[in-house]
Amino acid sequence: MISAGDFRNGITLEIDGQVVQILEFQHVKPGKGAAFVRTKLKNVINGGVVERTFRPTEKFPAARIDRVDMQYLYADGDLYNFMNTENYEQVALNQDLIGDALKFVKENEICKVCSYNGSVFSVEPPLFVELEVTDTEPGFKGDTATGASKPATVETGAVVSVPLFVETGDKIKIDTRTGEYLSRV
């Protein structure tokens, strides 16, 4: 059991029969009255975000979220196939469940598949990926006085904003959380 006074960002709890993750929290001590904890909670199953306040003495059970390393094998229509690298068990997940999580992930890469009570609710790609630029317009010297960018298509089909010096065939490093270009490899 975790009391509201011990809340931290990223903790996953069961509140009112729902599994929620704490995105933000703030301990508030008003000049008059009792202290309370203001939170922003994300439902990990459906993705909804709500704001809620708690008394610091309220307690909630911690939710057990299983994160398993699985290899992304291939896409077959609306199904994405993953394989557990320890026991070679395969799982096919629906496009609705995946969303944009695999926008920067190539086949045979390792991802974390998150489940609660055996029910998969999301896929976490690696934090950073290295992909080859398949198409981009040439950048010309003297186009700008400050750092400018141009769109580039990477080998997974995603479009990333890159600096003018990046050319077709270059390998670049991308942060999958934000979709931003980090560096050339």
Image: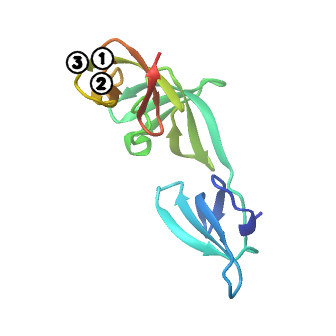
Residue 46, image x and y in percent?
A: 47, 56
Front position among marks 2 and 3? 3
Q: Nearer the viewer, residue 181 or 63?
A: 181
Q: Residue at x 24, y 21 (%)?
A: 142
Under mark 3, the amino acid is: Phe
Q: Identify the secondary structure beneath mark 1.
A: strand
Residue under pointer 1: 134
Who's the residue at 53% across and 59% down the image? 42
> Which picture quadrant has residue 84?
top right
Percent from the top left, x then y, of residue 44?
54, 54
- Which amino acid type corresponds to the residue marked 1 in the rendered image? Thr
Q: In the displayed structure, does residue 77 sit left or right of residue 125?
A: left
Q: Give the left or right position of residue 2, taking residue 17 as reference.
A: right
Q: Which residue is at 37% across, 13% downward?
A: 170
| In the foreground, 163 or 18 | 163
Pointer 2 or 3: first along the chain: 3
Q: Earlier in the sequence, mark 1 or mark 2?
A: 1
State how far apart marks 1 and 2 are (Cα). 6 Å
- Which residue position holds label 2? 153
In this rendering, the answer to whether 50 lies above or below 76 is below
Q: Nearer the viewer, residue 98 or 139?
A: 139
Give the mark count: 3
Name the element at disc 2. Answer: strand
Up/down of 8 relative to 17, above or below: above
Q: Residues within 10 Å of mark 1 (few under 14, many from 20)?
A: some
Q: CA distance from mark 1 to mark 3?
A: 19 Å
Residues under numbered marks 1 and 2 in contact, where contact means CB atoms less than 8 Å apart:
yes
Which residue position holds label 3? Answer: 140
Q: How is the image coloured?
A: rainbow
